[in-house]
Image (spheres, rainbow, N blue to C red):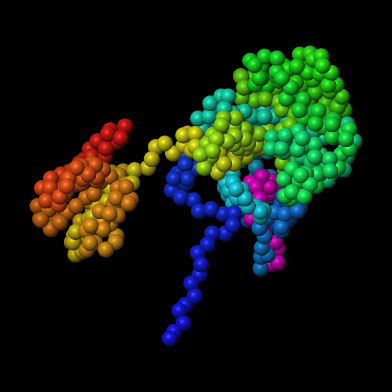
Amino acid sequence: MAKKADKTRARLPRGFVDRHASDIRAVEEMNARIREVYERYGFDPIETPIFEYTDALGKFLPDQDRPNEGVFSLQDDDEQWLSLRYDLTAPLARHVAENFNDIQLPYRTYRAGYVFRNEKPGPGRFRQFMQFDADTVGAPGVAADAEMCMMMADVMEALGIARGDYVIRVNNRKVLDGVMEAIGVSEDGQKLTVLRAIDKLDKFGPEGVKLLLGPGRWDGGKEGEGDFTKGAGLDENQTRSMIRFITIANRPYDDDSQKFAIDPVFKYGSGGESETEMKPLLRAIRESGFQNATTDQGLDELELIRDLAIGAGYDDGRIIIDPSCVRGLEYYTGPVFEAELLAEIPNEKGDIVRFGSVGGGGRYDGLVSRFRGQPVPATGFSIGVSRLMTALKNLGKLGQDPVLPPVLVTVMDGDTEAMAKYQQFTQKLRAAGIRAEMYQGNWKKFGNQLKYADRRGSPVAIIQGADERANGEIQIKDLLEGKRLSAEIESNEEWREARVAQLTVSEDELVDAVRKMLAAQAGEAA
């Protein structure tokens, strides 16, 4: 007996997902709204390949403790290493540097595409996902950063997110660097670990961040429970000072009306004393004991962003200064910003959750410069498309206009003349802007065609047998109404006599009759 051939097992790689029609259409709808805002701000599209030479990613590869340094790589036939892009910013930097003499600065561009991360997948954490970026290269002033924050707010509202349900949080890496300098943290690796710890404030709270700033933290909360994350190794005084800084704006506001002001006034006590006084946030930071040239430069830039935002009318809750806003990537050199959803939204399982960050960015003046050997300032913002799309769908902001399934042109006879007619009907409907398909399965079993139409959700079926063709006529069947009426008919005889939800028209009336039937269905649905 011949050995049965082995079959390849169909399986999806870990950390990757198949995308289906509803999600694809939702992403396209969302990206169209984002693109309209970017275009309105004067940004132009560009596309870079998904592969880059690995050395172009350079020290800006992701966390070093990940396998293969966080990227998927392969060696080309010339023995050079290529990697799938980790984000859309490093490829932009390479593109600008390579075409520097042909690019008009400031260079304002946007692009959407998939990025790939060779990291351990988990719930909601994938190895392939889409980002939608906008960047300004060649603009040294923080006015470009302020504009990014405003554009982020406009994007949120273009997507239907109400004011009060989102916020753009703003900080400055120079302020954070100055604070670390003030408390005696100078080693680059330790500084990066401190920033990563601060970035976990929303997830772990001040107590969890204390552990990450100090000896480290066990995921289970107790020694030996879960994985261990090594801390930054700050001493007790350094840890206390850093926690005091990042929570400086978390003390009670004096007036709820000031809650979302870009530079809020709040109750502030610099040394933990019981008596507090009213101070604007930025002034309180200046007087908090972390003053040095680096901190002052960062605060000056934040004050300019504040003034520009207020002057443009963005002082009503859309943009706030937040000392705990870090952003993860180490190439940021100045202002950083993050778009956060504040509304409680059901996730895929129906649980009510806070989605949190759905995008962010900042100033990265060193990224293009490393290719050029000269300063090239840049700032940008990246939206996490998949994450934001899920939130918008669950909020009812996307996918509310379902795509109508195609009209089905059935096949009653398989001769060339009949098949040509059926294809002609199909093309007429398509030319009129109506989705239509001609049945391509086994036409000899007509019942299977109607079952197929039912599974597809087709609203209308076109039927022409030999008798109708001889008379130049077509039967048009309202499948939605037929399904409703069929529940009321108890026998095949009644069905045949009623000719449920079906009418006969001339071939010339095909398009008009289908349009009227679809319009009637839409009216009933509304």
> Is 295 drawn above or below residue 518 in the view shown?
above
Quadrant assignment for the N terminus: bottom left
Residue furthest to the bottom: 1
Between 375 and 233, the one nearer to me in the picture: 233
Question: What is the x, y in percent for residue 432?
Answer: 28, 43
Instruction: Please indicate, yes or no, whether residue 401 appears anywhere in the rendered image.
Output: yes
Q: Is residue 17 magenta?
A: no
Between 477 and 270, the one nearer to me in the picture: 270
Residue at screen point 23% across, 55% down: 410
Left or right placement of residue 36 versus residue 309 in this view: left
Left or right placement of residue 58 versus residue 478 in this view: right
> Is 132 drawn above or below residue 5 in the view shown?
above
Residue at screen point 78% across, 18% down: 268
> Is 245 drawn above or below residue 517 in the view shown?
above
Question: What is the x, y in percent for residue 426?
Answer: 26, 51
The image quarter in which residue 325 lies: top right
Quadrant assignment for the C terminus: top left
Residue at screen point 77% across, 25% down: 248
> Is 450 drawn above or below residue 360 in the view shown?
below
Residue at screen point 84% across, 18% down: 273
Question: What is the x, y in percent for residue 515?
Answer: 24, 40
Between 439 and 230, the one nearer to me in the picture: 230
Q: Is residue 94 magenta?
A: yes
Instruction: Please indicate, yes or no, whether residue 136 appears anywhere in the rendered image.
Output: no
Left or right placement of residue 460 versus residue 249 in this view: left
Question: What is the x, y in percent for residue 400?
Answer: 42, 36
Left or right placement of residue 162 versus residue 299 in this view: left
Count of numbered labels shown in the rendering:
0
Q: Which residues are magenta?
A: 78-97
